[in-house]
Amino acid sequence: MRVFMAMTDVGADPCMIRLMPSGRESLCRPGQTLLDAAIRSGMTVPYGCRHGTCASCKAKVLEGDYELMPRVSEFALMSFERDEGYILMCSTLPQGDMVVEVDEEDVEPGIEIFPITDFRAEIVSNVAVTPDIHVLRLKLKQPGDVVYTAGQYFEFNIPGLPETRAYSMATTYSCGNTMEFHVKRVPQGVGSNFLCDLVKGASVTGSGPYGRMQLGSRERNLIFVAGGSGLAPIKALVEKVFSEDFRKEAWLFYGARTGKDLYLVPEWVHMAEKYPNFHFIPALSNKDDEKPWNGEEGYIADVVSRKMAGIENAHAFLCGPPIMIETTLKSLYKLGLYSSDISYDEF
Ligand SMILES: Cc1cc2nc3c(=O)[nH]c(=O)nc-3n(C[C@H](O)[C@H](O)[C@H](O)COP(=O)(O)OP(=O)(O)OC[C@H]3O[C@@H](n4cnc5c(N)ncnc54)[C@H](O)[C@@H]3O)c2cc1C
Ligand code: FES
């Protein structure tokens, strides 16, 4: 078996990948990753970030040559694992037919798997809502073809970049042909600056939907925790659950550094007035003394610990930067939630 650690030219013919122990097979196009080929053909392999950092898609190569993309993080796949033939499916380009050992998942009840579709869309509006977050609305050019649900994300093609960038939908499918994304402008970030600079009428392309951070049972209390542009998928999830006849309690914890970094606050306040079982709890970690603030202060993980003491029968959805996810997970475990009670995307 050969393992190439640098990008090389791929052959022009598709190859066959076989997953074991199921024996299911799929064609993989030149330049397509193993994960992309598997999920586009309907295989339910585990995955998360699709960018070589979360390690959810780890698998073992039984046969075949492949190229591991340079983006694979050393923490997600350690050297000794690489030596033993382990790979991250999202960042592996087959160089011929391959046989790979991976646990195909039993999809949880209530989790929907949709076909991955390539999309083309036009920018309808692009509004800066904080000093670094833009809300982009896109109109699909092939309405009806892209089916998705709240909590999922799409991959965008970025001019000049060989790799795509993922952005989570802030709207539910019932919103029709218009999709909303919240993009944080990262300093020197190629993808985020490209998207934040798009003007009305510009075209974008990509594919999706991806991701399993979806609403499962509606018979549990729901804890939503968002930081920064992580509010996007959380907004879609909250809006979806309250578009139904939801009878349990739901809390939205929304953390930001200063008041300037919060957005959509009037909309959440309005929603809390409309639904007595929805509770909106914004918190600032670095309160701006010039502006009055009557909300919670401190890191969102500590606010969750304080407010959720004694919570039972709950599922939590988290989305935000890695440090927020790490600290909030600790808080939730201390409150008695298990990892199976928590879904999250970090970025
Ligand atoms: C499943 C998933 C869903 C996502 N959804 C969203 C979303 O809804 N909204 C959104 O804004 N982003 C989202 N992201 C993050 C997004 O995909 C990009 O990683 C991010 O926009 C940075 O890309 P870039 O090309 O601008 O930066 P790059 O050119 O990749 O990076 C430039 C520099 O910035 C650093 N950097 C990268 N990301 C960040 C960050 N988030 N904060 C600070 N520094 C960073 C890098 O380490 C690098 O040094 C999501 C990521 C994943 C995996
Ligand atoms: S490393 Fe996250 S999906 Fe592959």
Image: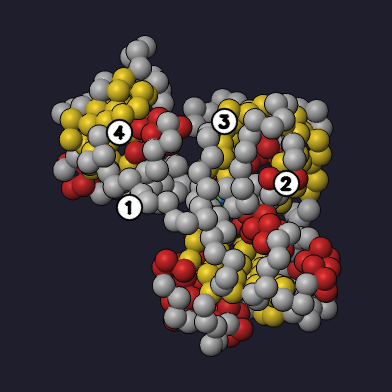
Q: Which mark is residue 174?
A: 2
Q: Which circle's residue, 3 or 4, is located before the other in the chain?
A: 4
Question: Circle 1 is placed at which residue position?
Answer: 75
- Which of pointers 3 and 2 lies earlier in the amino acid sequence? 3
Location of the N terminus by quadrant is top left
Label 2 is placed on what type of residue? Ser
Q: State the SS at label 3.
A: strand
Q: Nearer the viewer, mark 3 or mark 1?
A: 3
Q: Is residue 157 left or right of residue 284?
A: left
* Amino acid type, label 4: Arg
What amino acid is labelled 3 in the image?
Thr
Q: Position of residue 283 (x, y in %)?
A: 68, 74
Mark 4 or mark 2, earlier in chain: 4
Q: Nearer the viewer, mark 2 or mark 1?
A: 2
Q: Secondary structure at mark 1?
A: loop
Which numbered marker is on residue 24?
4
Q: Quadrant of residue 173?
A: top right
- Which percent across, then down, holds residue 250? 65, 72
- The tag earlier along the polypeptide, 4 or 1, is 4
> Mark 4: which secondary structure?
strand
